[in-house]
Image (cartoon, rainbow, N blue to C red):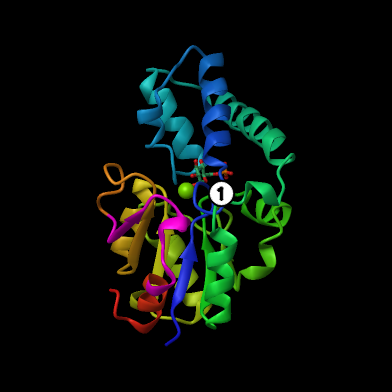
Amino acid sequence: HKKGFIFDLDGVIVDTAKYHFLAWKKLANSIGVDFSEVQNEQLKGVSRVRSLEKILAWGNKTLSEDEFMKLMGLKNDDYLSYINKMDASEILPDVSKTLDFLIEKKQAIALGSASKNATPILQKVNLFHKFQAIVDGNDVSKAKPDPEVFLIGAKLLDLKPEDCIVFEDSVAGVQAANVANMISIGIGEKDVLHEADYIFKDFTEMSPAFLEGLISGTVK
Ligand code: G6P
Ligand code: MG
C-alpha cells in the first residue's frame, strides 16, 4: 500500500505560526489595527494577500495598491528576521520521527503549504531532502480552503486524492483536504479543528499503529 502523506508547513512541521502572528500583529498595530488570537486562527493557512485583506477589513481600512504592496513587504521582512534565526531545534515534537517512519515504510511524502517561504524554511531546519514533492505559495493560484494545493501534491506524487492523507493545523487547510477527498488530520485543538477526520494535539500523540492503519487503509 503506497499512500501520499501531505504535510502543511507552518504550525505542523515548524512552529512558525507564532512568527506569522507576531509579524502581522506588529504590522496591524503600525496602522492602528489590533486583532485577537481567536481572530488569528482565520489567518492560518491563508495567503499573504488574503491575510492583509482580512486585517484591513477588521480595522475598516482601505489602502491604495501601492500601500498594500508596501505593507505586505514590511510584514514579510519582519517575518524573515525570525526565520533567518531558525534551526532544526524548531522542528515540532516527533515530526522528524514521523517523517522517518513513513520513509522507512516507503510512503510518498509531499509538502502542501500556502507559504512562499516554504523552501528556505525546510532548508533551514534541514528537512528539505525528506520531501518527494513540494507545493507551496509559488505554485498555487487558489488559496486554501480551495483544494488546489493538495490536488497538485497528489498529482506530483502520482497518487489519487483518496490515497492521500493531509496533516493540517488550520481550519482552511482541513477544509481544503476534505474538499480534495483526502483524509484530514488536524494538528492542534479539538474545538478549532473539529471538521478534521482525526485530531491530535501534536505528533507525539500519534501512535505507530495509527500510522500503520493509514498506510494499510484500516484507518480511513
Ligand atoms: C501559511 C501560514 C499563513 C501564511 C501563509 C503565507 O499558510 O499558515 O499564516 O500567511 O502561509 O505565508 P508567506 O510565508 O508566503 O507569507
Ligand atoms: Mg499551517
Q: How many marks?
A: 1
Quarter the C terminus occupies: bottom left
User: What is the quadrant of residue 58 in the picture?
Assistant: top left
**Horizontal side of residue 66 vs 181, given as left or right:** right
The local secondary structure at tag 1 comes to loop
The magenta stretch spans which residues? 196-209
In the depicted structure, whether residue 70 falls above or below residue 181: above
In the depicted structure, whether residue 134 falls above or below residue 33: below
Foreground: 109 or 189? Answer: 189
Foreground: 170 or 117? Answer: 170
x%, y% of residue 143?
Answer: 43, 51
Residue, x 67% and y 51% (percent of image)? 121
In the depicted structure, whether residue 73 falls above or below residue 177: above
Residue 152 is inside the magenta segment: no
x%, y% of residue 3?
Answer: 43, 79
Foreground: 47 or 91? Answer: 91
**Horizontal side of residue 189 vs 85, given as left or right:** left
Q: Is mark 1 within 8 Å of ligand 1?
A: yes
Amino acid bearing label 1? Ser
Residue, x 52% and y 16% (percent of image)? 29
According to the picture, the residue beneath numbered tag 1 turns out to be 115
Residue, x 43% and y 24% (percent of image)? 56
